[in-house]
Image: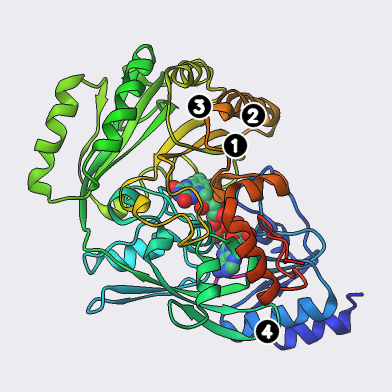
Amino acid sequence: MLNDAVVATLESGLRGELIQPGDAKYDAARAVYNAMIQRRPSLIARCVDVADVITCVNFARAQKLPVSIRGGGHNAAGLGVCDDGLVIDLSLMRWVRVDPGKRTILAGGGALWGDVDHAAHAFGLAVPAGIISTTGVGGLTLGGGIGHLTRQCGLTIDNLLAVDMVLADGRFVTANAKENADLFWAVRGGGGNFGVVTAFLYKAHPIHTNYAGPMLYPLEDAAEVLRWYRTFIVKAPKDLNGFFAFLTVPPGPPFPAHLHNKKMCGIVWCYSGPLKKAEKVFKPIRKRKTPALDLVGPIPHPALQSMFDPLYPPGHQWYWKADFVREINDDAVALHVKYGTELPTMLSTMHLYPIDGTAARVKNNATPWAYRDAKWAMVMVGVDPDPANKEKISAWARDYWTALHPYSAGGAYVNFMMEEGDDRVRATYGKNYERLAKAKKKYDPSNLFRVNQNIRPAK
Ligand SMILES: Cc1cc2nc3c(=O)[nH]c(=O)nc-3n(C[C@H](O)[C@H](O)[C@H](O)COP(=O)(O)OP(=O)(O)OC[C@H]3O[C@@H](n4cnc5c(N)ncnc54)[C@H](O)[C@@H]3O)c2cc1C
């Protein structure tokens, strides 16, 4: 039972702040990115350092409290927050340290990608991450990490060199290729199942300015564009990334008025090779078919990384369904066009993110990410600010996914999943699940960390 005296023991052990129901900050502190998620934790501990995290883990274990770990709070399933338990909130641990000599970046467990991009860019460096800069380093990395640099630099986990962690028993450990190598294997895709990561060490790449941005085409051309894209991108040089999307053009700059609110398809390109070669790379793409809108050009890496932030602020209703995809045949193209034409709201979208190139050079069992042979991570995303549209966006995403699922590889990227049950988690990890379950048994035998895409400890 949590009484005042018990809570006081936790509070006295923290340098950070403890927020409880009734506190003025409580509702803001329990809110996560997806406004569809409304959970009411008993305690929210805003940790400022590793000592705070150790205190929280020991407290949750001793009190048998459900515990969730909050990084950037972006998880669509809301896995950073729990009901009636303790939230270990890392949002005050957003520090970043760049070592320009070694080209490494050390980031606090609660850092956002915008923090990393900002710090790294001053040194002409970048770490492969996602496409929205307010996403947490923590959740994105631990699930894999797909973005504009995937084909060139691999997944985020392929650039992870080490983690500092607090385990379920309160021990602090470092995991890397040599130290606690089984744990290091497990965290590179196994999510927050194994403990609280207090720091991530990344390999950075000398990337300063990309040649990037969206090229949009009329919806009437979607089938032809998608058929071209599916063969073009898998043969493209690895420094060229491009994800396919169905979208509605936002009614404002930089989009021309005649396209406002129009449903379209497009490819968001990112060429991260030498800038002087960029025009040449895009010449055949532009020549093949003149886009209705071409916003592709030189852009500093952090500007690309935050390009879509204003469209997708926190607080929207958010529901998505995903799968890995090995090929997009003509039947799948036709279904994509059908559902792409039926985007239910302005912000709803569908993305096909390439996961080939450098990411595909890693073996299926080298990390928990079991779909290195797939070509895309596909996600149908229903989004709207109005809670009244919750059912509409969810039904569209579900129907779209149901239609395309038979054409998929089976599992989905864990970071693009809602809470979809044990079978989906197992399908996602495939043959790697048993090894993850063994690591879970070793590092978290009582499943203290279970507010996540949960891996059950091996029997
Ligand atoms: C708008 C938007 C855009 C996105 N774009 C991309 C994209 O381009 N590429 C991509 O790969 N993904 C993308 N994602 C998915 C994203 O990777 C996941 O939602 C991810 O879980 C977010 O991480 P977070 O730290 O912000 O989330 P949180 O909700 O804070 O946490 C998510 C999960 O990770 C665990 N976790 C977080 N931090 C830690 C930590 N330090 N230690 C241990 N466990 C931790 C939590 O316990 C929880 O289970 C996007 C999501 C959104 C909402």
Above/below status of 280 relative to 229: below
User: Mark 1 or 4 closer to N-term?
Assistant: 4
Tell me, for residue 118, which label it has, or none.
none
Snapshot quadrant of residue 126: bottom left
* CA–CA distance in space, label 3 to label 2: 17 Å
Judging from the image, what secondary structure is the residue with disc 2 in?
helix
Residue 264 is at least partly visible in this image: yes
Q: CA distance from mark 2 to mark 4?
A: 40 Å
Q: Which range is magenta?
A: 89-93
**N-terminal-most mark, 3 or 2:** 3
Q: Which mark is residue 346?
A: 3
What residue is pinned by disc 1? 321
Disc nearer the start of the sequence (3/1): 1
Q: Are marks 2 and 4 in contact (CB under 8 Å)?
A: no
Mark 4 — residue? 170
At label 1, counting other C-alpha atoms closer than 10 Å, the crowd grade (few under 14, some 14-19, many 20 or more) is: many
